[in-house]
Structures are given as C-alpha cells and as structure tokens.
Amino acid sequence: MSELRVRFAPSPTGYLHIGGARTALFNYLLARKEGGVFVLRIEDTDVERSTQESVDAILQAMDWLGLSYDEGPFYQSERYGLYKSKVAELLEKGHAYRCYCTPEELDAKRKAAIQSGGKPRYDGTCRNRADQPDTPFVIRFKTPCDGTTAFVDRIKGAISVENTELDDLIIQRTDGNPTYNFVVVVDDAEMGITLVIRGDDHVNNTVRQIPMYQALGYEVPEFAHVPMILGADKKRLSKRHGATSVMAYREMGYLPEAMVNYLVRLGWSCGDEEIFSMNDLIEKFSLENVGRSAGVFNPDKLLWLNEHYIKTGDPERLAVLVTEILAGQGVDTALGPDMPAVVKTLQDRAKTLVEMAEGAHFYFEAPDTYDEQAAAKFLASDKRDVIELTIKHLTGLADYSHDGVETAFKAVMEESGLKFGKIGPTVRVALVGGTVSPSIYDVVAVLGKDAVLTRLQKALASLG
Ligand code: GLU
C-alpha cells in the first residue's frame, strides 16, 4: 500500500458527464496503479440543486465504467457538525470573523470599487470589529494580507498568486450553512487526501483553499488540475456537441471499455498507442503523460473504439447485452437461435450494440413481408425451382454447421447449373426479408433447420 489517497467529489446536480467521468477515471487509475486509496465523496451542500436521482445516476455510471472506490460514498450533507466545529476553530484562532454587512452595503462597496478602477473585493469592514450586533451575519475567512500563495501543480507546474489578490471568502452563509471552498478543505484534509486531481476550472479555488489548510493546521495536499474538454469548435464541451452524459452512450449501444479507452486518451497519451484495456491503463497511467492543453471531444473516435471492442468482444458477454436491448424492444429471444452464435455473425458488421440488436432481429422474427424491390428481383416466379432445390438439399442436410451448409449449397449449384449469385440472394430475401445480412451460410447455420425450411416454404408460397 502506498500513501496515496485520492478522491472523486462530484456535485449531484445532474448526470455524470464526460469531463467528470474522466476526472474519476484518472483518480481511479492512479490509485490502482500505486496501490493507494480511492475515496468517493458526494458534494451535496447545494440543497436546492442536489438530488438523490443525480446521486444514483452518478453511482450507476461509475459502476458501469468499472470505477470502484475503496471508501465512501461520503455525503457532505451528513458532515455539518464537523464543518461547524471547524468554523468555530477558525473564529477562535482569529482566522475568521463575523461580517454583518448587508447585501445592499456589499453591492454599494462593489460598485464603488469597480468605479475607482479596483477589484470588486470585500473591503474588510468587519475584519476587526469587536461588537456582535443582533443582525444576520456571514463568516468570512481572514485571508493573509501579504505574501503569496503558491503550489506546484502536478500537471500545470508552478502556480502562484499574491495574497492581496484574494478575497476574504465567505465560509458560512447567513443561514448557517458552510460554503463549498471551505468544506472541500475540511473534507480533503480530514479524509487524508494526499493528491487532489480535478478539473482545471478549480485552479482559482485551489489558491483560495490553500490558506485555509494552513490556518486550520492541515497539511496541504498536492494538486493536479486536468485541462478541460472542448468540442470540435474549440468551445467548452456542451450538449451542442452531442451527448455529454456518460450513460447516454450506454443507451446508444457503447461498451464501457470503449468509453474508458476514449476518456483516458482525452488528455493522456502513451506513445502512439490507441487501444488500452483497463489493466493496461492501471499499469501505464501516469500524471506525467497528461497533456497541458485541452482535449477535443471526437465522437467519431469514440465510435471507432466501440467498433473495435465489439469486433474483439467475448460473444457470450455481448450476447447478454444484446439480449437486454432486444428484450427492451419486445423481442423474445428465448426460443430463437443461440444468442452467442447470433452475435458472432454480427460482430464484424456492427459499430454499436444497438446496431447489433437491429441486425439480430430477423433471427428471432421471421419476415412478415419482403422488401419490395428485393422481392421483385429475387422472389419472382422464375425462382421457384431454385427455392425448391434448396429446400430439398437443406432438408436432407444433417450437419448445420457453416461448412455443412456450404456443401448443401454446392449441391444446389451443381444440380441447377447455376452460380451462387443466382441462388444466394433469393435465399437471403426468403430468410431475412431483405438484401442485407451476414454471410448466408452463417445465417442458415445459426437459424437452424426448422426455421430455415419454414421460411423457405413461406417464400415459395408467396411466389406468383
Ligand atoms: N464538487 C465539485 C464539482 O463537482 C468538485 C470539487 C473538487 O473536486 O474539489 O465540480
């Protein structure tokens, strides 16, 4: 076990999006690689926007991606006692103070500051006041007036800011609730987090948080701020660029390993390798190879990875997933052909599980009607002999393997004197209803004798 303790700290105000999932993944990978501990903390202090539904969605998405955590989930909403005691500690040590300025007064100060060309910061009116009037107050952190706050980011390098640039942050609101920047410090310290990996939209928070660690006598953890994710137009990734919810991709038939592989490459690289299993990543991932520039979300590459994982996936496992999709579409697969065998015929043809399910329909539901153009060409009355001959040879066939079926078709070709091109398409339309399907030998082998003969008889009956 190493000393490394990392955490993922989502706010449950929506689904798990691409950016959050990547942050979670980086934390997970580093923890697993170094034998550290991965903590999950739900930051639900924003009572109005936090929902149980979002918590569930986030947990479900992490589970789908395979990002297991070692401790938690901890909920900030259950830790108010701790935060209160830490606010009291800061007050007692003189690192925090009650601020009685009204919203109107603060607004006026802000406007005056902007007008005089200054920064709209709190002017410190209540910093040294001794009285405690009986009016509403917030509690502010007393940011040091001089010196600098500096840290060496594990991704971005040295970052520093003059303390005079920092505001006296509110750590407890008028209603008694603690604020985000404060509880994050308390939690990261109390949970023994040694390295905070999060999005670089938090860099400005980090320089505000460090003085609070120091005031509370906590050790300051290391930080690694991950560059953000952009859309193809180089604007921050949003719904305009396509689905941003991780689970939306599951719905669209993506495999979690494709998503994991894609997410990690949005910011991390290892030479020019593209394909990484989770185990590869646990071995190879390092913050040193996380780039400093923003990643660009490319749905085509995600689809390409998904196609790869479908092609190379275990048919038994894919069968379970495709069965679920088909069940959701009301297709009963229980009486149909063996699902892994079905999957094997489609693995080279589908980019998503949804496409695979679509391609599998005909195995479980005989065509009611035939594609009009296909039928006009391949199920015209002159096809009677070919169909009858095929029925004859497939009836006599005992071995319904790919090779067995091939032998039967060879016999049909020989007896009829026709090339495969004059037989195969007709059989295909009869069996699947149209002109697109996996190899006809595979289709016949997988459908099996009964289904094949029934469908051929039906096609025969349909001829004029
Ligand atoms: N709860 C914050 C968010 O979802 C993350 C805070 C952090 O990682 O420090 O943006």
Image (cartoon, rainbow, N blue to C red):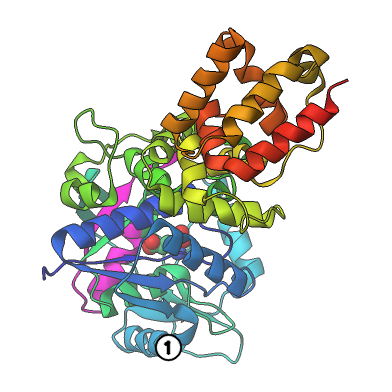
Q: Which residue is drawn at the image coordinates 51% and 29% (left, top)?
A: 441
- Crowd band around label 1 with a 10 angstrom C-alpha radius: few (<14), some (14–19), many (20+): some
Q: Does the magenta stretch include residue 223?
A: yes
User: Does residue 455 appear anywhere in the picture?
Assistant: yes
Residue type at mark 1: give it: Lys
Indicate the quadrant containing the C terminus: top left, top right, bottom left or bottom right: top right
Q: Quadrant of residue 369?
A: top right
x and y percentages locating residue 129 in the rendered image = 44, 82
Q: Which residue lies furthest to the right in this view?
A: 464
Instruction: Name the spot of residue 25 as percent of width and height, x first.
Output: 34, 54
- Left or right: 309 as drawn, with respect to 213: right
Q: Does the magenta stretch include residue 449?
A: no
Q: What stretch is highlighted in magenta?
A: 206-230
From the viewer's side, name the closer residue of 2 and 223: 2
Judge by depth and name the residue closer to the eye, 423 or 65.
423
Quadrant occupied by the N terminus: bottom left
Residue occupying the point 56% across, 8% down: 419
Residue underneath mark 1: 84
The percent position of residue 302, horizontal first and vertical second, equals: 45, 36
Task: Tell me the element at label 1.
Answer: helix
**Is 147 situated above or below 180?**
above
> Which residue: 47% across, 67% down?
59
Residue 423 occupies which quadrant of the picture? top right
